[in-house]
Structure formats: C-alpha cells, structure tokens
Image: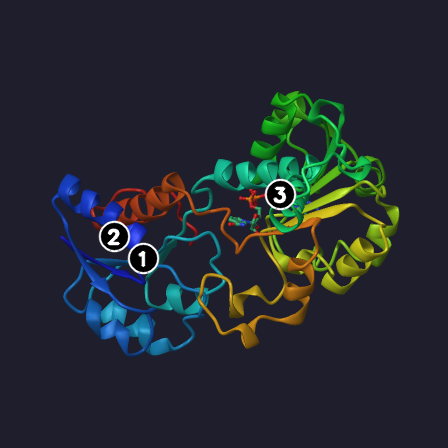
Amino acid sequence: MKFAIFNVSESEQRVLDEWTKKTGHEVKVVAGSLNAKSVEEVADCDGLTIKQTSKIADELVYRKLHEFGIKSLNLRIVGTDIVDFDLAKKYDLLVTNVPAYSPRAIAEMAVTQALYLLRKIGEFQANMVNQHDFSYPDRLQSHEIYTQTVGLVGVGHIGAATAQMFSALGAKVLAYDVVYNPANEPFLTYTDLDTVLRQSDIISLHTPLLPSTQKMIDEAAFKKMKNNAILINCARGGLVDTPALIKALKTGEIAAAGLDALAGEEKYFGKQVQASDVPSDFQELNAMPNVLLTPHAAFYTQTAIRNMVEISLNDALAIREGKRPQNLVH
Ligand code: NAD
C-alpha cells in the first residue's frame, strides 16, 4: 500500500525509512500542510498522516479524500482541533491522533528545568563566564530536592510521569486535578489548587489549555506562592499570565521560572526568525538570570518522534486493513 506523509522533518525521515523497510509499504513525502491544493498529492495513496497547526477548514479537502477512497485522517500529534469533525463524518473519514507519544519526554524536561533552577546552575555559569567569578555568594546556596515540596497542576499522562520522577528523587509531591486517579496515589497527595500554590517550592503545570485553565496562573496565583517558588511550564503558554509572571519575578514574589511554553510562541518557536520578530516579553524573560527558556522542545526526543510517526502510520494501515486503530478519536 501507499501512504502520504505531510510536513516531514529530518528526524522523522529516519523513522520513516525504517518503517517502510519493516512493513514493505510505500510512503510518499509531501512538503507542507494538507490543504485544498496539496490534497491532490494523495490521489494515488491509500492513506495519509499529517502534522500541522493550520486548521483543515475547506470542505473540498474532505470531499477529495473521500473521492480518492481514503478512509481516515491520521494525525501524528495530540491536538485534534485542526479537524472539522462534522466534515470528517460527512465524508466517512475516521480520525486518529497520538495522545501520548512520550509523556516521559515532557516530564524529564520539567524535572530537568526544576533541578537546573533549584541548584542555580545558570547563575553560577553566568558568573564564571561573564565575570570570572568562581565564588559562592550566599544567594546561590540551594536546596536538595528531597527537602522540597513539588506541586503539580494536572496529573494526566505527563503530570503522572512527572510525579513519579520527583517522588523517586525523594521530593514530597502535591497535586491538583479536576479528575481523581487512584493509580497516582503512590506518588503524590491530592489536594486543592490553593494548597498547591501556597505550599509548593516547585510548581509544575501539566493541564491542557482550556477556557477553565487559560491564565490560571495570574497575579492572584503568584501572590499565593512562596517567595522561593520555582514555576515550571512545559504545557501551554496560555496557562500563565506573562506580564504577571514578569512582575512576580521582578518583585521577588517568586524565585525563578522554567518555561518550555510561552503565550504567543507560535510565531517564532520552532523557527529561525529575525531579531525584530522576537517579542519584548521573551527578551525580558531571557535576560533574567533566574529564568530558563526552551523553545517548546520538551517533546523533541528520539522516542517521541519515533512514536509519533510509527503510531500514526500503523493506525492508517490498520484502518486500511479493516482492523481497529490504536487511537481512534472519531
Ligand atoms: P492529559 O489529558 O493526559 O492530562 C491532562 C490533565 O489535566 C488531566 O488529568 C485533566 O483532568 C487535567 N485537567 C484538565 N483541566 C484541569 C483543570 N482546570 N485543573 C486541573 N487539572 C485539569 O494530557 P497530557 O498528555 O498529560 O498533556 C498535558 C499537556 O501538556 C497538554 O495538554 C499540552 O498542553 C502539554 N504538552 C506539552 C508538550 C511540550 O513539548 N512542551 C508536549 C505535549 C504536551
């Protein structure tokens, strides 16, 4: 059989080559996203996998896929908001995604950022590199993780993996989630959001961005936090009110922040841009010695990329063969 894969990165290509060798099926690489023009590229294919942020709103795309005999839209990402489900249904297209390509990849980034900031590694390094200062200033004395309380907001796939890691390091782990999962009990203590914010030395966010979570970490939330608190956001930028975060860091309301996600990042994370395109809030945060920024890179591991490509193609193949796919959304 022949499948089309859109928007392939260099690291995905390696996995793709292995998949075609292993399964004996052919894969056609199509540049860019799936849209009304590029849909013509799949006329000779049995299925397709896509990875994009632009919504597939044009009915023509769904109609063409149906006419070409394609049975599904296979997303190799988590978010399914790019699909118009009414149109998918109208044209008999099943939709699959990859909801948990590697929770550990994100959890490890959160733990790494927290330990980096807790041990003030960036500040020691900046002193040495910029000022030939190899001394031990009082303000750079730190704590050991087993003496710290970690507060997690959202303990689904990624939050649970993060809880397990912090718990293995000896930290006390508190968690707030709207859903109770008894499987998490060995690694954390469930409590309310207020207690997480007030009692934690490290606060790590792991909820989706929803109307109920938009800017959930705002000025009032920062006021509740300890002055030594470290905020980690490896989820979505919109969970945090960025101006309130900058203010909290400047006034010493909290001690540090590790951010793999920042509101408005879509315009520049994952790309090489002109200096003038980098927003002022990013520049302001980047200049702070107690802030660590990464460009939404928590997912970027070999395991995660492999899972995104393989799981998505395997689901496309399963649907063609009349079998049940692993991650059916609709
Ligand atoms: P998940 O669906 O398994 O878990 C999310 C958890 O958040 C669930 O337990 C849910 O009950 C909880 N939740 C929902 N609304 C809440 C609220 N108002 N208050 C408290 N808890 C709430 O998702 P996941 O796979 O663990 O992913 C979590 C988030 O991580 C994603 O939505 C995404 O934003 C982010 N993410 C980031 C990267 C990255 O590279 N930085 C990669 C993948 C995912």
Q: Identify the residue at horizontal 37%, vertical 68% (top origin).
A: 90
Residue 240 relative to residue 307: left or right: right
Which residue corresponds to mark 3?
125
Answer yes or no: is residue 157 visible. Answer: no
Vertical position of residue 245 compared to residue 325: above or below: below
The quadrant in which residue 189 appears is: top right
**Residue type indicated by callout 3:** Gln
Which residue corresponds to mark 1?
9
Q: Which part of the image, by quadrant, shows the C terminus?
A: bottom left
Give the SS element for disc 2.
Answer: helix
Spatial CA distance of label 1 from label 3 is 33 Å
The answer to whether the residues at label 2 and label 1 have Cβ atoms under 8 Å apart is yes
Of badges 3 and 2, nearer the viewer stands 3
Query: Residue 142 at what x, y percent from top left?
Result: 75, 32
Query: Residue 87 at what x, y percent from top left?
Result: 40, 69
Color scheme of the displayed model? rainbow
Q: Nearer the viewer, residue 173 or 74?
A: 173
- Pointer 3 or 2: first along the chain: 2
